[in-house]
Image (spheres, helix red, strand yellow):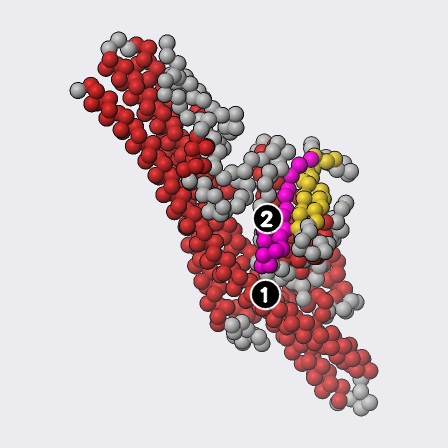
Amino acid sequence: MENLVIDEGPNTQTFISHSDYRSVMSSLAETHHPLAGDDPLSSNSSSKSFRNSSFTEDSFLEPPAYADVVFSPFTEKPISGNGNSSQPTQHLSNSSSEFITIIVSNPQKEQEISNSLVPGGNTYVTYLITTRTNMADYGSSDFSGSAEFSVRRRFRDVVTLADRLADSYRGFLIPPRPDKNVVESQVMQKQEFVEQRRLALEKYLTKLASHPVIKKSEELRVFLQVQGKLPLPSTTDMASRMLDGAVKLPKQLFGESVSAITAQEAVQPAKGGRDLLRIFKELKQSVANDWGGSKPPVVEEDKEFMEKKEKLRDLEQQLSAASQQAEGLVKAQQDIGETMGELGLAFIKLAKFETEEAVYNSQRTRAADAKRVATAAVKASRFYREANAQTVKHLDTLHEYLGLMQAVHTAFADRSNALLTVQTLLSELSSLRSRVEKLEAASSKIFGGDKTRNKKMEELKETIRVTEEAKDCAIKEYERIKENNRNELERLDRERQNDFHNMLKGFVINQVGYAEKIANVWTKVAEETSEYAKDSI
């Protein structure tokens, strides 16, 4: 009996489902833009990809498992077993000769020194972070050579890095770090969760390295380069900060400790929690701004900024709608590819049945037709899946910019908090001066003055001096954050224009290219089937 077998090449890989658009976005490794270099839709790359997976014309098809006849998209880079990207992407800075590449790989389980009552709670995973760069900030002497170094970090270190960057670079659009999803880590398979986190960390660090300011920060350099335990000070949890603030509050209220905000504290947000009195004062100022009858001493008067803020709010809504539609498209294309593949396997079985039971030439003709339809269906299924993988990579830009809106909100919140600090300090100065004036008026009525009132006035004047310094620093910080916002919004506009252009161009070329490939598959079947029809006349 005639045998027909699908020849699967040794490099054929099992397809990973795209049923969840968001999970696919995080699981796909970052690669170079599909439009750069060789066109993945060219005929040469197509024939090369299908050389080992095409049907033989003179043998019979044994129905294999569907997952065995599907392979990866053209441009996906293989990932080794330990999670190493085989060809890392280099991210160039504004200077074309300057680059930095970051690879996260080789996750390892470590043992916590302290004991934990939770089963498995005394273990954690560390990741090998390898950096290659020719930037002088990282010790490279010139652009002709490059330095390479590796460190091991755990997720807690990434949290510390993100917190330190948020404190030091207020007003900048800092890429949001991956979430620490404890529930997901328990539900998912451990290996799958670790791999997804590895990809998310690599993506996050790569974004930091592509930021024109953050990539030169001392915080990032220390994180990437310094061996051993991360030397950056870790963030105290909120409960501990609130407890410290609660202990400090009575002393501030009863005058046992200084209640005035220092210049150093003024440039940091009040939400840290260690100074509850400052939090209460700023909360009172915020309520007065919203519900009070009087106008705050300083208000946001940058009309251009307010207009951009409103436009970005509208952009976020449009991105959310577009991202949802992209998710629907990916799921629909996935369903088409799977259904087409199952149809091809059904025709394989039908062709086999017709061949085994064939007595007349008409039966053999039907078997040959079914065989060609099966061949075309499975090939078309592969093209659908490749097209879908490319669609995910192109439309991922929508999801990335939607996630970036979180950084925009944080940068705007930095500006609002800095303005609130200025308003609070100005109100505090007004109140302090009013108290001094009342004390001076009361003291002037007493011959020789009142020593107690005089002492209180001296204390208030010192508090006014400290508060004045804090106000000046707060105003400078506010102006600095405003400038950071302005520069970052300009950069966002430039990069969004370029990224969206590349996204649309790549998406359209991808759709056209694979539509032509699928059309060619069915055109060939139509021509072959018509020849059978002529022969039977």
| Mark 1 vs 2: CB contact within 8 A | no
| Residue 88: quadrant of the picture | top right
Mark 2: which amino acid?
Gln
* SS of the residue under disc 2: loop
| Residue 450: quadrant of the picture | bottom right
Mark 1: which amino acid?
Asn
Q: In the rendering, which numbered label is found on residue 90?
A: 2
Work out which quarter of the rendered image holds the C terminus and state it. top left
Residue 106 lies in the magenta stretch = yes
Residue 393 lies in the magenta stretch = no
- Indicate left or right for 156 with 524 as reference: right
- Indicate left or right for 436 with 404 as reference: right
- Provide residue 234's location: percent of width, then percent of height: 72, 51
Prevalent SS, magenta region: strand
Which label's residue is closer to the chain start, 1 or 2? 2
- Indicate left or right for 314 with 261 as reference: left
Q: In the rendering, which numbered label is found on residue 484?
A: 1
Can residue 475 be seen here? The reply is yes
Can residue 325 be seen here? The reply is no
Which segment did they paint magenta?
91-108
